Every structure is written in structure tokens, then in C-alpha cells.
Amino acid sequence: MKILASVAVVLSLVVSAVGCEHSGGDASAQPANAAAPKLNHRVVVAQGGSLVDVRTPEEFQAGHVSGARNIPVDEVSARLAEIPKGKPVVVYCLSGARSAAAARMLKSSGYDVIDVGPMRNW
């Protein structure tokens, strides 16, 4: 059990240092190492990182990941003050296109971002 916890901490540190970005494109495509991003983003959120759902408020109300904050992609730049800067930010949407755009905006503003892409990757 200690080994698994140590691996999770190391993976989260690697993600924090390197970052991760969903490439967009075909929303049905899964990365070859799909298991690694799932572990990494969950660990980051468990360790106090922010979880941001960049879909519309209506989509968010219809269902979202527990603990997520809803900041629609078109409002991200205007609402940066709502996203703590000291810890990684995990973003997701429906298909991956909006989360990729939000990740770019956040990275350009100095945030450490993990883009989960489609919500189904959670």
C-alpha cells in the first residue's frame, strides 16, 4: 500500500512539473496511456488541486464530477481570480475541445494545468 501511495505522489509531481494537454481533434480518440492521466488528475485533485468544468451552466447542472467548479470556457479569462494559482488545475468538458482551449488560456496565465479532455476520461 505504501508503494502505491509513493507511486501516486511521484506521478502527481511529474504531472505538476511537466503538465498535460489534450490535443483536441477526434473526441472519441483515447490516448495510448489513458490509465496514466486518469490516475494523475485524480491524485492532483485529491491533493488539493482545483477541478474546473468548462462546459455551460446547463451542462454542468445536468451532471458533473463531484467537487468541480463550473467556469464556462468563454468566462475563464475573466474569472481567473476564482482559480487558486498555487496548485495544479484540472479541466474537463464534454468532448475535449473546450478544455483544451481553457488549458491554453490558463497555461498562458501561469497556471499548472492538467487537461482531462472529455468528461468520460474522469
Image (spheres, rainbow, N blue to C red):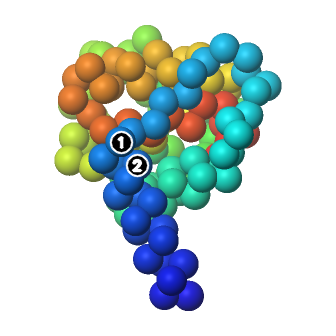
Residue at horizontal 61 percent and vertical 18 percent from the top:
24
- Please state the total of marks drawn on the protein image: 2
Q: At which x and y percent is residue 75?
A: 38, 16
Q: At which x and y percent is residue 34?
A: 68, 45
Do labels 1 and 2 touch, CB within 8 Å?
yes
Residue at horizontal 54 percent and vertical 78 percent from the top:
4
Q: Can the viewer see residue 89? A: yes
* Apparent side of residue 44 relative to residue 85 in the rendered image (left or right): right
The amino acid marked with disc number 2 is Val
Q: In the rendered image of this protein, does residue 80 appear above or below residue 74?
A: below
Q: Can the viewer see residue 56? A: no
How crowded pointer 1 is (Cα within 10 Å; few <14, some 14-19, many 20+) is rated as: few
Q: Quick one: SS at disc 2?
A: helix
| Nearer to us in this view, 67 or 101 | 101
Q: At which x and y percent is residue 27?
A: 73, 21
* Apparent side of residue 54 relative to residue 118 in the rendered image (left or right): left
The amino acid marked with disc number 1 is Val
- Residue lying furthest right in this view? 28
The residue under label 2 is 15
* Apparent side of residue 93 relative to residue 107 in the rendered image (left or right): right
Residue at horizontal 76 percent and vertical 27 percent from the top:
29
The residue under label 1 is 18
| Nearer to us in this view, 60 or 44 | 44
Q: Quick one: SS at disc 1?
A: helix
How crowded pointer 2 is (Cα within 10 Å; few <14, some 14-19, many 20+) is rated as: many
* Apparent side of residue 93 relative to residue 102 in the rendered image (left or right): right
Q: CA distance from mark 1 to mark 2?
A: 5 Å
Q: In the rendered image of this protein, does residue 62 appear above or below residue 87?
A: above
